[in-house]
Image: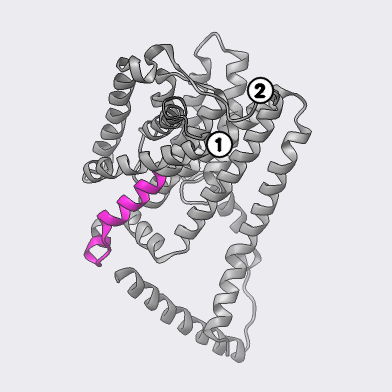
Amino acid sequence: MPSASDVRVARFTRYDVGTVAAVVVLAAAIVLFPSVAPNAYILSVGVTVISYAVLATSWNFVGGFTGYISLGHAAYSGVGGYATALLITRRDVDPWLALVLGALIVAVLSIPIGIASLRVRGASFVIVSIALVLILLLVFQAWGSFTGGSNGLRVPRPFPPSVLRPAQHERFFYIHGIVLGVVLFVWWLFDRSRFGTGLKAIREDEDKAQALGVPTFTYKLVAFVTSAFFTAIGGGLYALWFGNLDPIFQFSILTGAYMVLMSLLGGLRSLFGPLLGAIVVGVAVEYFKSEYGDSQFHLVAMGVLLAVIVLFMPDGIIPAVAGWAGRFRPQATSIREQTQADLAASRDTTGTDSAMGAADREAVLR
């Protein structure tokens, strides 16, 4: 008779072998990419794409866990970038310390914003998130004496002048890779925790989750602040790498829309979905910009891509591929003979799973 520990080991093996393999492949790709990039331009595109991956995965703490679609996350990346830059230029703070302090400032500011905005749902939440970005755009444009206004704000790079631009691309690529690993790890921890179970209950049916005793507002606020913190880290890193901030670009609705598009394309509810979406969308955006930079054709292309996703892969690439692959599994289409001993073992395992499921439900209610 299999014990509860045996069942847990079996579950771990089934669930996490693929995740571990994907992490190994991702780590190898990040380590090798700068050495195989043919030129500095391709390497800079790689930095842009991995920056998108950090932002999209950070956004997924809200969208993937709670189901709240925020088009205004550019507010947190933008403020994170400006906070980092202003701490360096106005207070002479070390760039890496300024990056963390800027993200903490954004996290603190996101608490009252979350308290106000998370009281509404659906389209109302989307409108509130867009309004926040537009307000910040106007403020940072008008406050020229402090933020540089429309003239922009120059950000000193954290490396000495002897480090040439291609070498800086390489270093920032690796730094973004480390940050991406941290964000993915925290998302994975959320996904496997009791807290994450409560967030998923909110996503499926918030009213029922609240009726079952889940502190829905507190859970949503924690996910919201976590998302804002990591998004600000991504915005601060971009500011250090790019070296110049412009409020029109930093607080663009398109930035938030790209985060949503990337997560939808890869799969909102999957760990690597936003990363996959960032690779596809990031490469496509950079290609269309290089080919049709004088026009707005890249925006048309992104709109067509979003329409295709909604029509043919509403759950994203990873869930769609997993569903297609599941159709070819032998156990899904074949009938095998079972002995009496097999049936008895199956019943024992089912009973253990039911007991564990009841314990999980009690854990969510606590």
Q: Which residues are magenta?
A: 208-227
Q: Which residue is mark 2?
A: 161
Mark 1, other Cα within 10 Å: few <14 / some 14–19 / many ≥20: many
Q: Residue furthest front?
A: 92
Q: Secondary structure at mark 2?
A: loop
Residue 35 vs residue 198: left or right? Answer: right
Q: Main secondary structure of the magenta part?
A: helix
Give whichever of 36, 265 is nearer the camera: 36
Measured as percent of width and height from the top left, residue 37 is found at: 75, 30
Q: CA distance from mark 2 to mark 1?
A: 31 Å
Residue 274 vs residue 27: left or right? Answer: left
Residue 36 vs residue 73: left or right? Answer: right
Lower sequence index among marks 2 and 1: 2
Q: Is residue 141 above or below residue 275?
A: above
Residue at coordinates 62% horizontally, 84% vertically from top-left?
338
Give whichever of 116, 266 is nearer the camera: 116
Q: Residue furthest top?
A: 294
The residue under label 1 is which amino acid type?
Ala
* Quadrant placement of the N terminus: bottom right
